[in-house]
Image: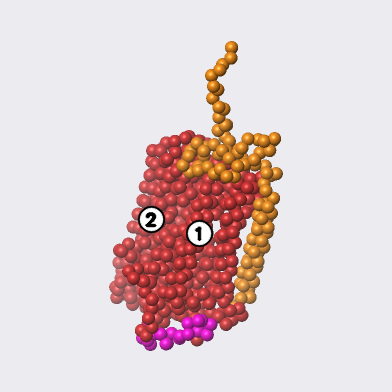
Chain colours: A orange, B red
Amino acid sequence: MTDDSPQPEAAPPPSEDPRLETYKDGVRTLNWFVTPVPLFKEEELEAMFEPYPLTQPADDQRWVLWTVRIWVGFTLFSIAFILALLVAGFFYGGR
Amino acid sequence: MSATAIDVPLLGAKWTIGLTALLHTAVASLSIGLAALVTVLQIVGYRNRDRRYDLLARRMQLVHVCIYNIGTIVAIGLLFSLSGLFPQFWSQLFVHQFWSLIVEEFIFFLLATTVTFHYFFWQKMWGHKKLHIFLGALLTPLFLLQFYLINGIGGYMLTPGYQTGQATVGGLIDGWDRMGFYNPSFLMLTAHRALANVAYGGFTVAAICGFMHYFTHREKVKKYYEDNARCAFYTGFLCFLGLPIVGYFYAHVLKYEANEAYVNLMWGGGDVVALGIDWWWLKQIFVAGMFGLSLGYFHDSDRRTGANFALPRVLVWSLALFYLLYYMSMGMIMTWKFFFAMAGVAAAAALLAGHLVRYHKGSGRALFILMGALSFLTVMLGGYVREAARPRFVNRYSHYDHVYIPEQRQPVLMVNKRPEDVFTPEELAAAKAPPKGALIQAGGVGQKLLDPVALIRVHCSGCHTLERVKNYRLTDRWSLIVSQMRAYGLKLSNDEARLIVEHLEAAKPY
């Protein structure tokens, strides 16, 4: 005997981020155009508590990583330069 | 006066600057605190592989991006207002610290870009979380450097600190004054602001979480707000602990390097007292209340098991004892009546903390909101009294001409007028005269006090309260008493001792 009554659609696991699409051929992808509003929707916020991390290193876009790496390098150099100015200014600036 | 000055209807020049500066303080201080808090939350999330902390960090960084913009725009408004309303003061200061301000501007650029990258790349580099956290962590040293520079100028405004003729416009490097920048109160101001901003950020984030907790029905989301609030509160409290100690040494510096400001703060002079309220001591009462609330909270939460970010009970009581002793030493400055009032407020706040946590079945949400509000008030009052305690400008003629030599300064300013062209001789004399009760010479250690009131306040209160002096009954023996104090180590010249004795024997007020 078969059950012809419609089966309820399987709900996504509660721990899954709503932006996380299904695994396609073993590759995890994100839909960047869906922005949940966790501030006012508790269900969505709760669904975002897991997992950690959201994606793997291979998923990150190269241009983002290189932008950040170059910027971090520039900022570190700038901090070192400003500190050097302050130290030099302490000994040599003014009377 | 032969020159006109721009005025602002209703508010007036002074309150225009004051209100703009207060608004800037409220926003910019929070911005600095949030940067540190976001990094703490991200690190906690990363170490525990718990995304809840990271989620809150991201939301707080969004708040940060917004208020950073507001703070910057208000700062620009402040500079515009200063340029128009106090042109002589501002152009003088800008020329004096030109290179500091240029570097400051460059750091603003670094900060704005870093916070933008950090927020908008959040979801794009989950696989490189450490790099992302490091990018966000760069904001804190950048902010420290940023207010390191502005504190050189802010500290100089309160404690120019050095003798006439030592300004270095026209020195080795124009636009950089080593002695003016590394002025006497610079270090204490920097330490105090660094701790205060992170404490303010921590308590504010905890208050936001506490507020959101009220509108939550799901247990997991409630725990999300509770745990994040505890993390933020814990971070804020650790920074808050150091504040009174740094503040004590800050006051010590002011006592010798900005005596009038010190007297105004401690004995309620200048604009520190407004609308009949001494805002400085009111702030101290708030601080005592915050301390009692925090210790009460940690004492209570330690009894419950499994609470993250808790202080061991033995540490809570040790801290309470330490601060009681600490404030007793502060009793040398405040009256004992006020000391007991503060202790009472702290004790009542500790009891209230226990009640609030029990009433909310273990949640600290009400307490977090209360602490956030008190933290905001103390930051506002601290900023206000620091500026209000300074000697006032006379006809907007800069106080710092005690330090600057106008003839040296004028050639490098765009204002093509000498003070003599703008003010009458009487006004110039009034502007340059030392304020009553203050030092007779501008400058640092080795200055001479000739006002007996200032002498009594400064020297007698170094070891005991003024109440003790006032309560002393053998009033015909002041000469003997002062001699005894000198024997105990009080450093007074014979002239100063004579002035004090004469004033006390005449039973004049002080």
Residue sitting at 42 percent across and 36 percent down?
Answer: B361
Same subunit, tags 1 and 2? yes
The image shows residue B476 at horizontal and vertical percentages of 30, 73
Magenta stretch? B408-427
Label the magenta part by its dominant secondary structure.
Answer: helix
Q: Which sits in the foreground, B306 or B311?
A: B306
Q: Which sits in the foreground, A27 or B19?
A: A27
Against B471, is B344 above or below? above
Tell me the chain of label 1: B
For label 1, the crowd category at 10 Å Cα-Cα, with few meaning under 14, some 14 to 19 and many 20 or more, is: some
Against B129, is B23 above or below? below
Against B327, is B310 above or below? above
Q: Secondary structure at mark 1?
A: helix
Amino acid type, label 1: Asn
Q: Secondary structure at mark 2?
A: helix
Q: Quadrant of residue A16?
A: top right
Q: Which sits in the foreground, B290 or B108?
A: B108
- Determine whether, in the image, residue B191 is placed left or right of residue B382: right
Amino acid type, label 2: Ile
For label 2, the crowd category at 10 Å Cα-Cα, with few meaning under 14, some 14 to 19 and many 20 or more, is: many
Is residue B310 on the magenta stretch? no
- Determine whether, in the image, residue A28 is placed left or right of residue B268: right
Residue sitting at 63 percent across and 52 percent down?
Answer: B134
Tell me the chain of label 2: B
Q: Earlier in the sequence, mark 1 or mark 2?
A: 1
The image shows residue A78 at horizontal and vertical percentages of 64, 64
Residue B479 badge: none
- Foreground mark, 1 or 2? 1
Can you identify the residue that label 2 sits on?
Answer: B285
Residue sitting at 58 percent across and 51 percent down?
Answer: B120
Can you identify the residue that label 1 sits on?
Answer: B69
